[in-house]
Amino acid sequence: MSVIVEIRDLVKCFGELTAVDHVTFEIERGEIFGLLGPNGAGKTTTISMISCLLAPDEGDVIVAGHSVRTHSIEVRRALGIVPQEIALYPTLTAAENLKFWGRMYGLSGRELDEAVDYGLEMAGLADKARVRVETFSGGMKRRINIAAGVLHRPQVLLMDEPTVGIDPQSRNHILETVRELNRDGMTVVYTSHYMEEVETLCDRIAIVDHGRVIADGTLDELRALVGDEDHIRISLGDASPEGSAEAAEGDADTGVAEETETPPEMLAILEGIRQVPGVTRADAVGSALEVLAGDAAAVLGGVVESIAAAGAHLRAIEVVEPDLESVFLHLTGRGLRD
Amino acid sequence: MRDPAAMGVLLGMPVVLILILGSALGGAMDSGIKVAVVDLSRGHSTATGSAKPPSDELVSAILESERLADLFEIEQLPTERLAREQVRDGSIAAALLVPAGFDEDVASGRPVNLVVLRDPGSELSAGIWESVVTAFAAQFSAASVSVQTVMETVQRGNPSALMAGGGALVAKAVEAVTSDDGLDGVKVVDAQVKGLTAVSAIDYYGLSMVAMFLMFGAMFGAFSTIKENREQTLNRMLSTPSPRAQIVGGKMLSVFVLGMMQFSVLYVATRFVFGVQWGGDVLATVVVAAAEMLAVTGLATLIASVAHTERAAGGIGPLVVQIQALIGGAFFSISVLPDWVQPVRYLSVVGWTMEAWGAIQTRGAGLTDVWGSVAALLAIAGVLFAVGVWRTEALR
């Protein structure tokens, strides 16, 4: 496969803040590429520079052989954008919205009509073509939002958190749509804070934190970074140390967790677990605990005992395959939602 | 276009305000314009006989006219010098000088030359007075021709003709000159009505409210870019291959077109439903409206670059419109203010618009007469738009 998007040493600063700090990675033609990281990691800023909305302070982005610095119109022609917000006109109908956005991509006449029909079919809203978007459910709006980005059949589709705040049925529809577009040959760059989506959807993933790419590769390659240790995930119940559970919930819709210090009670539990022979690492991730051990079966008893000794209520405990949360934890010492 | 509330504000509100202000302030507008008459022919008349000389008849007709009394506070002054002083100091808006030799001119059928002294700061009021005087002058010309015809008939030695009908003819001519009914009969009414209705309250507020609400319309239209920025449709547009200039130009064009549609609706409604006199040059009126739209778009672009949020813009915008309307003469004629304050209207888009529309309305001005105001509006548009775009780009 050939490289279709090349990010070269990209830098973007806002005053004193370096939002994107010498980021470099490549996206190959025909793949679904995931961009994963906590809020404020620099994902949207990177996407904005790829889509020519922000000019890089340093570095360059090459899309389909064109530089954003010198050939931005060619770059924008090669791209389709699905923004995180529902960027549609609510008082226009679904068909009118698609027609408008099709025109913005230079479509007209029969080509435009066909594109609108394609978009409505793809969104599963052909029967709602003449209904105003403002009357749609969140999921329906999301689907039209995606359709508006692919009318001109772009080479690369940038999708920024496209499943935020929608019902599971619409989410499944969208994920299936992404796979379908990809099967048709479209390269997809997908950002999400839903790790499960990125894990199941993406061929390759770049993990960003504090404006830097800290790891990239396939899911297996990233999992390998954690090593072959067993991964134990522990959920604490209502009797968990005060404040920890509430702080970890954060904003359920956006996935934004509040930045809080780990409470002393939780630190005491962690300290107890770390003393259990065989445990190599223990961290708090919201109200949950993440424990790494060479042999999970050998340490479970000691871990449960230490939790009970700290006066906490154990709600669930499971041994899981290392996932992106584990990878991020391993690389940064923090949870993705911390 | 699909927002009924916005349409109500932009189209319904000005009509309602025109009606309210036109009705409520009609009395205030329709009386109290201070003018004066000076009869310089008094003492110079060579007319003989017991009949009052024409100058007396004219002055009496003006002073005693009930119809004029509804519009003017008319004072008779003894000297031209005093009249000039009062015009100069703004005590009166205008003065009519009945020149020496007026009676002879009328008697001999020569053209009547009346002089109107105008206060440049009370252009509107003085314009009305001049229109009235013009109508009277025309009336006297007609009457004097009739008189001369009768007198020539008599002088040719045909007294029986005079007995048969000449007396009635003379009486009719004199009546035409002096009576209020004669004003209607003479039918210089067109010129008179044009002048009078041009300054009726509903005519004045018809123009001023349209000028003000065009500002509201264009400003709300231009502020929509803030909403589009928040809702990300603007960013989505900017990420398409369409050139940025085309996108910005398209948005401005839509504001302009919507504004002109708003103007068209208001123009038709005020002119044909409420009978507002806009003047004869429709093209000049439309050009001024277009220039105002551009100026307001520039102003809105600047405000949007300062305000950032819809809420802030929604607060600043109407305030700016009200101030512009106030200093531009939308609520009352700026000519009532002291001379040193009056130039403040040139800081206002509404002021320039009202100046141009007022000239078209009251003086029958055309495109060539109002190009100065149009140029000023376009200059305002250019400067404000450039600064607004520069600020917006700098902040991105």
Image (tube, coloured by chain):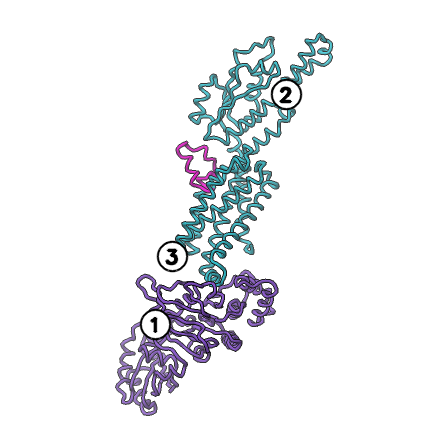
B37 inside magenta stretch: no
What residue does disc 1 label? A212
Q: Are marks 3 and 2 on the same chain?
A: yes
What residue does disc 2 label? B142
Q: Tell me if I can see residue B316 in this picture.
A: no
Q: Residue at x 56, y 72 (%)?
A: A122
Q: Is residue A220 left or right of residue B25?
A: left
- Give x and y (percent) for residue A299: 31, 90
- Compute the Cα span from label 2 to label 1: 94 Å
Query: What residue type is disc 1 on?
Result: Arg
Mark 3, secondary structure of its residue: helix
* Colour used to depict chain A in the structure image: purple
Which span of residues is magenta-colored?
Answer: B325-349
Q: Are marks 3 and 2 in contact (CB under 8 Å)?
A: no
Query: What residue type is disc 3 on?
Result: Leu
Is B270 located above or below residue B77 in the figure? below
- Give x and y (percent) for residue B77: 48, 19
- Give x and y (percent) for residue B66: 57, 25
- Compute the Cα span from label 1 to label 3: 25 Å
Mark 2, secondary structure of its residue: helix
* Colour used to depict chain B in the structure image: cyan
Q: Disc 3: which chain?
A: B
What residue does disc 3 label? B395
Query: What residue type is disc 2 on?
Result: Ala
B340 inside magenta stretch: yes
Q: Are marks 1 and 3 on the same chain?
A: no
Q: Nearer the viewer, mark 3 or mark 2?
A: 3
Q: Nearer the viewer, residue B276 or B32?
A: B276
